[in-house]
Amino acid sequence: MSTTDSAAAPGRLPATLVERILQLVALSALAVLGLITLFIFREGTPLLLRVGLGNFLLGTDWQPLAGRFGVLPMIAGTAAVTVGALLLGLPLALSCSIVLAELAPRRARAVLRPAIELLTGLPSVVYGFVGLVVVVPWIRQHLGGPGWSVLAGAVILGIMILPTVIGVSVDALEAVPQGLRDASLALGATRFQAIHRVVLPAARSGLVAALVLGVGRAVGETMAVIMVVGNAVRVPRSPLDPARTLTANIALEMGGASGDHAAALFATAIVLFVALLGISALAYVARRPAGAPGTGLSEGLRRLLSSRPPVEPPSSPPGAA
């Protein structure tokens, strides 16, 4: 009998049992997620059906005690703050990722990357406090308005998503095979051409994943947003207007909510859940596997070759046989 078929040694768990335990742990995580989803939909769906999905999503009047449940101001506030955070944070995050993965010396990378990752461990309330004492007064003094605004929330969230987006983007760029870079450089490309036309297209799947994580962090943030956006229940007309996000609405009102008010907050959570699910679905569609046509080495080198003039073979010297 072979060693693999023999019984487990005394004091050791059989491999099959260990495998079953790990599978059970993985399934338990999915089960918890499923139970949370089921609970949210069970609590919020009856009110959605009674009020009407259109009235709930497009209504601008949020007065739960009066029976008016319109979350359009919170949807608009969430969208405005998230888009602003992405506009401010993504270019900086992508630039830092390229520098760390492709351009920075090894010693600088060993210092900068852990320093950026340390920002992930800062509590949200710290970011919110900095925004409250620095960003909000600066906006009020130099740009006008009350200071608590969409712009303040976008600035703070733009900073908060940097560690997550940079970390995932650097991993995606470093996962690109070195052969792609070597092949592009051998074809005469400069270092920046190789990054732009070969490395970034090859790492697109990971970069899209970084974008989704950044969006999820921005949409799901609560405490820092509460401290800087003003929490006004109205559709923001400019970046200097105060606003309220979906998560802030739940956090601010859930403590004293009951009856239809609590059900409306659960319905708000359903809207948030479906929005994040839709963003993830769009990102999944945008991500193509590395071996798909138009990605990876073949596409990057094709675009690189198409941007360079053809090289003509040297002419034979006169009189050559």
Image (cartoon, grey):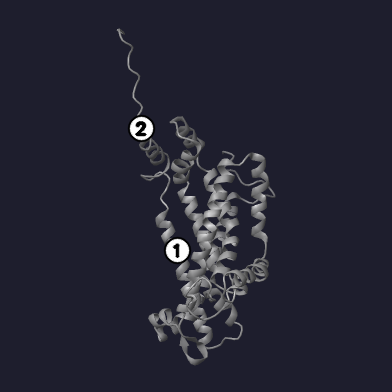
What is the x, y in percent for residue 99?
Answer: 57, 45
Mark earlier in primary sequence (2, 1): 1
In the picture of the structure, the residue carrying the numbered disc 2 is 309
Q: Nearer the viewer, residue 12 or 243?
A: 243
- Quadrant for the C terminus, please: top left
- Quadrant for the N terminus, please: top right
Callout 2 crowding tier (Cα within 10 Å): few <14, some 14–19, many ≥20? few
Q: Nearer the viewer, residue 43 or 87?
A: 87
Q: Amino acid at mark 2?
A: Pro
Q: Nearer the viewer, residue 58 or 310?
A: 310
**Left or right position of 175 against 110:** left
In the picture of the structure, the residue carrying the numbered disc 1 is 279
**Left or right position of 40 against 119:** left
In the image, what residue occupies the spot 44% across and 45% down? 201
Q: Quadrant of residue 280?
A: bottom left
Callout 1 crowding tier (Cα within 10 Å): few <14, some 14–19, many ≥20? some
Q: Which mark is residue 169?
A: none
Q: Quadrant of residue 285?
A: bottom left
In this view, the residue farthest toward the right is: 11
Secondary structure found at label 1: helix
**Left or right position of 301 against 95:** left
Q: Is residue 157 above or below residue 77?
A: above
Label 2 and label 1: CA atoms lie apart by 41 Å
Q: Nearer the viewer, residue 296 or 89?
A: 89
Q: Amino acid at mark 1?
A: Ile
Residue 21 visible here: no
What is the x, y in percent for residue 40?
Answer: 50, 76
What is the x, y in percent for residue 206?
Answer: 49, 50
Q: Does the residue at mark 2 contact the one at mark 1 (Cβ under 8 Å)?
A: no
Secondary structure found at label 2: loop
Q: Is residue 297 above or below residue 249?
A: above
Residue 80 visible here: yes
